[in-house]
Amino acid sequence: MTTTVLKIAGLKVAYGGIQAVKGIDLDVRQGELITLIGANGAGKTTTLKAITGTLPECRVDGHIEYAGQAIKGLGSFELVRKKLAMVPEGRGVFTRMSIQENLLMGAFTRNDKQGIADDMEKWFAVFPRLKERAAQMAGTLSGGEQQMLAMARALMSHPQLLLLDEPSMGLSPIMVEKIFEVIRSVAAQGITILLVEQNARLALQAAHRAYVMESGLITMQGDAQQMLNDPKVREAYLGEA
């Protein structure tokens, strides 16, 4: 039986009187690529931030379990040490540091110098644009290059679970295809991924299973390929009647 890496039960998030997440259940099993799709404001990013403890002042109820341990209330730095990494919406690269320095920051929990060097070369091979600009300040990169860097930096921590929040946002169609090519490649290496994405078609094509979120609730879940052919999903998220 496949191990459950992430289990969420009855998760609720409230900002003052606003209930952003209204009691959801979600699980991610080892080696899966799971996508969470939905319109803007559905609660997708709030869900990821609840998992990683990066929400502003709010009330979080429910159970969040990672690798068999309850993690609600743990700091994000503690989660990185436990091999849970997140690429946030907006990338969040260290703009005044070089590409190489950003990647080294991704490996701050590690002390295997040769392994870190090997991994840097590994991800440079996946993202050749980054290798060409290794000494360049991250703030001077294009949006697509910053997204590549944010992903490579997270992967330098050797995550058991990688959370991706809107990786295609604001990118050109060519760069979106490249980012999804990398996501599929990372998943093929056995890294478990939970992907929040507005490009529902590409997300469903890449994923094993999917959850649909509307107004803070999970309204649909199942096999991603079957969802691609579901009339309700096609009409609401793929722009097809």
Image (cartoon, helix red, strand yellow):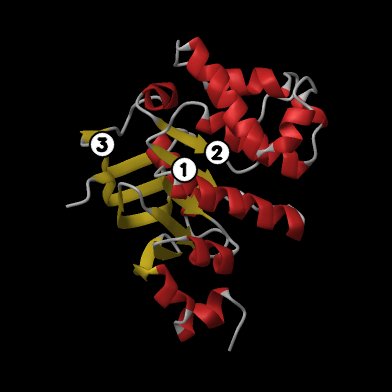
Residue underneath mark 2: 87
**Which residue is at a point 64% across and 50% down the rendered structure image?**
179
Circles 1, 2 touching at the beta carbon (< 8 Å): yes
Query: Mark 3 is on which residue type?
Result: Ala
Q: CA distance from mark 1 to mark 3?
A: 14 Å
Q: Residue furthest bottom?
A: 241
Q: Amino acid at mark 2?
A: Val
Report x, y in % for residue 8.
Answer: 28, 48
Dot 1 alpha-carbon crowd within 10 angstroms: few under 14, some 14 to 19, many 20 or more = many
Disc number placed over residue 163 in the picture, else none: 1
For residue 133, above or below residue 164:
above
N-terminal-most mark, 2 or 3 = 3
Give the residue number, with chain letter if any, for mark 3: 67
Q: Residues within 10 Å of mark 3 (few under 14, many from 20)?
A: some
Q: Are marks 2 and 3 in contact (CB under 8 Å)?
A: no
Label placed on residue 117:
none
Q: Earlier in the sequence, mark 1 or mark 3?
A: 3
Nearer-the-camera pick, 137 or 117: 117
Q: Position of residue 53 (x, y in %)?
A: 41, 33
Residue 129: percent from left, percent from top: 75, 36
Could you tell me which quadrant the C terminus lies in?
bottom right
Nearer to us in this view, 123 or 68: 123
**Amino acid type of the residue tagged 1 in the rendering:** Leu
For image coordinates 34% across by 41% down, the residue present is 60
Label 2: state its secondary structure. Answer: strand
Q: Residue at x 74, y 60 (%)?
A: 173
Residue 48: x and y in percent read: 44, 44
177 or 201, nearer to the observer: 177
